Image (cartoon, rainbow, N blue to C red):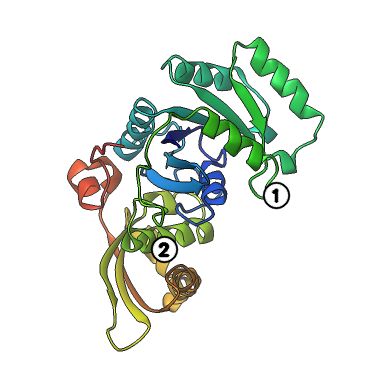
Amino acid sequence: MKSGTVAVIGKANAGKSTLVNVLVGEKVAIVSPKPQTTRDRILGILNEEGAQIVFADTPGIYKSGNALTAVMMRTAETSAKDVDLILFVHDGHKGVAESDISLMKHYLSFGIPMIVAYTKTDIMPEEQIPADAKALFEGGIGCDVVPVSARRGKNLTKLKKLIVENLPEGEPLFPDDVVSDKSARFMIGEIMREKILLRYDKEIPHGVAVLVNTFKKREDKDLYDVSLDIVCEKPNHKAILIGKQGSALKETLAFARKDMESFLGAKVFLTAFVKVKDDWRDKLNLMREFGYGEEKDL
């Protein structure tokens, strides 16, 4: 049997989480078109006949001047150093720049087998793909490059086969009924944050943390009580998150509740409070309180 770990690495918005969700067949990571959507390393476990692939979805590589981003970048870097394979996800529809080749070479230098998943081929001209593949080869990227579309399922079977071929022989690392290392409570908080990322513009969603205070299933009903805090950085951000007479927050909670109920397979009674913690992304004690900044072994 083949069994091993795969670090999913790439620039912000390359499509890493979408690809992992589709490969695993379950929602194990939230998705939005904004950078910094993934803040922590999240494991997604795929069980195939004769193989178990443990994907480590990592924060997108992104330059920003706060301590939280520095922690996220360190998470991505360390996650790629103790795995059996690196899956470098590249946004194909943006073309190939020198910075892309330089970043790929950086991870190739770790001496770990690497595959490039060239994503988003469904939203780009097909004739661009051979030209980009040539640019990568001429730039010194000697590993396999697989053009894929996660949304359309294009070439995913080929990608999975290639991943399995690069994994070592070994026993499964997780039971075959486990799809993620994250709890349902964690995912509920992430779903709330995902909806904020999707519904609010500019800097506000990036400065939001979600704390789940209550996550409890009622004994006599198929119903979960969920209470959470939405923490932002500025008083004016709080006003925008709540909206006029609470309208914006009500809409966002309704949006989130629907996805939570789908995830849990049960009704959700959801309450939320918006709080301000000035510049929490640059305060290590608050980052740790909100679940960021702790080093984790793969």
- Label pair 1/2, CB-CB below 8 angstroms: no
Is 260 situated above or below 31?
below
Give residue 210's mark: none
Q: Residue furthest left?
A: 285
**Pointer 2: residues within 10 angstroms few (<14), some, or many (20+)?**
many
Residue 268: image x %, image y %? 39, 78
Which is nearer the N-term, disc 1 or disc 2?
Answer: 1
Whether residue 150 appears in this view of the structure is yes
In three-dimensional space, the C-alpha distance between marks 1 and 2, rounded to whole angstroms, equals 26 Å
In the picture, the quarter occupied by the N terminus is top left
- Viewer-nearest residue: 55 or 67: 55
Q: Find numbered disc 2 in the image and state the secondary structure of the residue it sits on.
A: helix
Residue, far bottom: 220
Q: Is residue 102 left or right of residue 121?
A: left
- In the rendering, which numbered label is found on residue 192? 2
Residue drawn at x 54%, y 33% is 163
Instruction: Please name the residue shown 20% across and 41% down the image.
Output: 284
Residue identifier under label 1: 152
Asked whether residue 119 is in view, the answer is no
Whether 51 is drawn above or below 225: the answer is above
- The type of residue carrying mark 2 is Met
Looking at the picture, which amino acid does disc 1 mark? Arg
Picture coordinates of residue 4, whole percent (x, y):
41, 35
Q: Give how far across and how far down residue 43 sits, in percent.
A: 39, 45
Is residue 40 left or right of 167 when viewed as pictured? left
Dividing the picture into quarters, in which one does residue 209 lie? bottom left
Q: Secondary structure at mark 1?
A: loop
* Label 1 crowd (10 A; few <14 / some 14-19 / many >=20): few
Q: Residue furthest right?
A: 127
Q: Looking at the image, which residue is at 49% across and 57% down?
A: 27
* Viewer-proximal residue among 93 and 239: 93
Q: Is residue 217 left or right of residue 246?
A: left
